[in-house]
Image (cartoon, grey):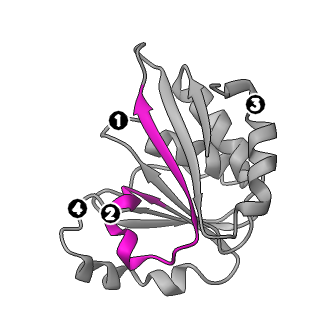
Amino acid sequence: MFNARTNSAEETQHLAACVADLAVARDLILLVGDLGAGKTAFTQGFGRSLGITDAITSPTFTLAKEYSGRLRLHHLDVYRIEELEEVRDLALPELLEGESVTVIEWGDQIVPALPQDYLEIRLEYGSKENERNITISLVGTSWKERMAQITKILDRWSVR
């Protein structure tokens, strides 16, 4: 587990870009946090680092968007999903294949329907207006070898 703190949406985006630099095909990232905590801002920075030039917006009403970059980015928002049965409509197994990365906002709501191999990014409000406390945790093995790299490249935001 790695704990970080950012002081603006731009810093959150920069932190996300550093994480994206380590992303490989078939990675799954769950974004967890309250409304307005920075999940979409994180995805915007992550996407920019993948070379995505399109505007990345929250897919709250469409549930899923796809963007092209060095890796294809599947950006999902499952806030409106009320039952795990609805996850089948998202075709997650297909999204997790090929040369793509999948980022799921509110991903903690559908953990039982996901492979148990992902990076969880938890964003929480800090004590100052634009401050965010960010906890990065891994589940499974795909990010295990990269966790030391994450710790190193995110050191400037580290909370000890």
Q: First in sequence: mark 3 or mark 4?
A: 4
Asked whether disc 4 touches disc 2, contact meaning CB atoms under 8 Å apart, the reply is yes
User: Which residue is label 2 attached to?
Assistant: 78
Q: Residue at x 65, y 75 (%)?
A: 26
Amino acid under disc 3: Asp
The CA distance from mark 4 to mark 2 is: 5 Å
Q: Is residue 128 left or right of residue 23?
A: left
User: Which residue is label 3 attached to?
Assistant: 155
Q: Check if residue 115 falls in the magenta segment.
A: yes
Q: Answer with the quarter of the image where residue 77 lies.
A: bottom left
Asked whether disc 2 touches disc 3, contact meaning CB atoms under 8 Å apart, the reply is no
Q: First in sequence: mark 4 or mark 1?
A: 1
User: Which residue is label 4 attached to?
Assistant: 80
Question: Closer to us: mark 1 or mark 3?
Answer: 3
- Return the x and y of residue 45 as percentages of the image width and height: 62, 42
Helix, strand, or loop for circle 1?
loop
Helix, strand, or loop for circle 3?
helix
Q: First in sequence: mark 2 or mark 3?
A: 2
- Return the x and y of residue 27 as percentages of the image width and height: 64, 68
Question: Closer to us: mark 3 or mark 4?
Answer: 3
- The residue range painted magenta reads 104-125
- Return the x and y of residue 72 as percentages of the image width and height: 65, 69
Q: Which of 140/39 is in front?
A: 140
The CA distance from mark 2 to mark 3 is: 31 Å
Q: Residue at x 60, y 31 (%)?
A: 4
- 6 vs 152: above or below: above
Binning the other alpha carbons within 10 Å of mark 1 as few (below 14), some (14 to 19) or many (20 upward) gives: few
Helix, strand, or loop for circle 2?
loop
User: Which residue is label 1 attached to?
Assistant: 36
The CA distance from mark 4 to mark 1 is: 15 Å
Amino acid under disc 4: Arg
